[in-house]
Image: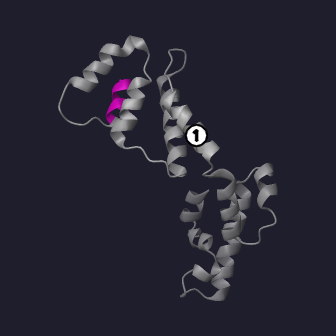
Amino acid sequence: MQAILVQQGLVEALKGETRMSPTLSQKEKNNKIDKARSVIISCLDDKALREVAREKTAAAMWVKLESLNMTKSLVNRLCLKQQLYSFKLTKSRSITEQLADFNKILDDLENIEVKHDDEDKALLLLNALPKSFEHFKDALLYRRDQTITLEEVQNSIRT
């Protein structure tokens, strides 16, 4: 949704009218706010739309959506961390799907401002590999003195 707003030059409307560029006329500000609100509405499903329908501006809708979807509550943070730390790759699903799941968990954590450095992400992914990949893990971990990156581990797993 935010990408669409950026693409259409409407992301500024998410700041709220008072924080928009002072070079814009009131008519231009109102136009951007209305268009942004329309884009947001068109991207929402019925359930989310009911939650934000009473909000009159794009900024207010955005704040409400953030509070609903990007909550920083302890429960949400702990559930996501648990998903990450207990993540395991299996032979029954494709590697591509499983790497996408792993990356989604990382993205969800970053969206609520839980950061992990790249080396830790790489190690978590290596530890998610099945027991049959022990030699593969060892080869990646001990082949050099440099740090290991998530991208490198993911590329190695794919190949």
Classify 155 as above or below 32. Answer: above
Name which quarter of the figure residue 125 lies in. top left
- Residue nearest the viewer, comparing 23 with 105: 105
Q: Residue at coordinates 37% horizontally, 15% vertically from top-left?
A: 133
158 magenta-colored: yes
**Residue 153 falls left or right of residue 62:** left
51 relative to 78, above or below:
below
**Which x, y percent locates residue 121?**
40, 36
Query: Which of the two residues, 57 or 88, is positioned nearer the viewer here?
Result: 88
| Residue at 80 percent of width and 50 percent of height | 46
78 sits left or right of 96 in the view: right
Residue indicated by mark 1: 78
Q: Position of residue 123 (x, y in %)?
A: 36, 31
Q: Is residue 158 visible?
A: no
- Residue at x 37% of width, y 44% of height: 117
- The residue range painted magenta reads 152-159
Q: How many marks?
A: 1
Q: Quadrant of the N terminus?
A: bottom right
Q: Position of residue 60 (x, y in %)?
A: 70, 69
Question: Looking at the picture, how far across and down is residue 146, in whole percent?
Answer: 20, 36
Q: Is residue 93 above or below residue 80?
A: above
Q: Nearer the viewer, residue 128 or 72?
A: 72
Q: Residue at coordinates 77% horizontally, 72% vertically from top-left?
A: 56
Locate residue 113 relative to residue 117 in the image: left or right. right
Q: Amino acid at mark 1?
A: Leu
Q: Main secondary structure of the magenta part?
A: helix
Left or right of residue 80: residue 159: left
Residue 109 visible in image: yes
